Structure formats: C-alpha cells, structure tokens
Image (tube, grey):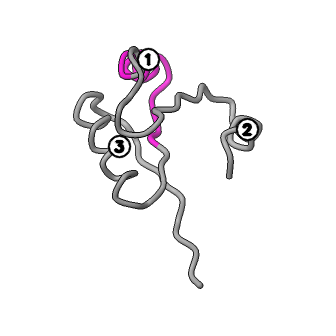
Amino acid sequence: MTFTAVKRALDAELITTGGFGFPKGTMERIKSAQERRGVIIFTDPDFAGEKIRKKIAAEVPGCKHAFFTKRRS
C-alpha cells in the first residue's frame, strides 16, 4: 500500500518520517497531531520500522501502532 492509497482510504493527516533521521520539525508535527486527533504509527514490520515506532512512542505517549504484515512465500 502506498502513501497515496492510504491517503485515499483514510480521513487522516499523514506524516512521513523519511526513515530514522526525521527531518526537522517532524516530531513536533507528530506531537501536535497526537494532541488534535491521536496518532497511529504505521510502518513496515522490520527492524527499521520497529526502531521508528519506538523512537516516536518514546517521545509521543499514547500512540497506537500498526504495520504491514510480511507476505509468506
């Protein structure tokens, strides 16, 4: 599922992190979104995704977590 597909399916603000090194202001946008509507952290189920979820959850309490499942071959 792509960013565009998620945007079409949900009435939500989408904030991309761009990986581990969040662009300046990203964490502040996530904190603001948590105060307004709540946050669902949606990442891949790999090491990188888990690291990103943990980084956000440590700074923004109360986030929900979601991730793509791995396809079985």
Q: SS for tag 3?
A: helix
Checking the image for residue 52, the label placed there is 3
Image position, residue 52 (x, y; %)? 35, 43
Q: Dot 2, crowdedness within 10 Å: few (<14), some or many (≥20)?
A: few
Q: How far apart are the two marked residues, 2 and 1, measured between alpha carbons?
A: 19 Å
Q: Amino acid at mark 2?
A: Thr
Checking the image for residue 4, the label placed there is 2
Q: Quadrant of the C terminus?
A: bottom right
Q: Residue furthest bottom?
A: 73
Residue carrying label 1: 29
Q: Quadrant of residue 56?
A: top left
Image position, residue 48 (x, y; %)? 37, 52
Image position, residue 69 (x, y; %)? 52, 66
From the image, give the main secondary structure of the stretch colored magenta. helix
Is residue 61 highlighted in magenta?
no
Q: Earlier in the sequence, mark 2 or mark 3?
A: 2
Asked if 16 appears above or below 66 in the picture, the reply is above
Q: Are marks 2 and 3 in contact (CB under 8 Å)?
A: no
Q: How far apart are the two marked residues, 2 and 3, measured between alpha carbons?
A: 21 Å
Q: Earlier in the sequence, mark 3 or mark 1?
A: 1
Q: Which residues are magenta?
A: 27-41
Q: Nearer the viewer, residue 20 or 60?
A: 20
Q: Amino acid at mark 1?
A: Arg
Q: SS for tag 1?
A: helix
Q: Earlier in the sequence, mark 2 or mark 1?
A: 2
Which residue is rendered at x = 37% and y = 36% of the image? 63
Between disc 3 and disc 1, the foreground one is 3
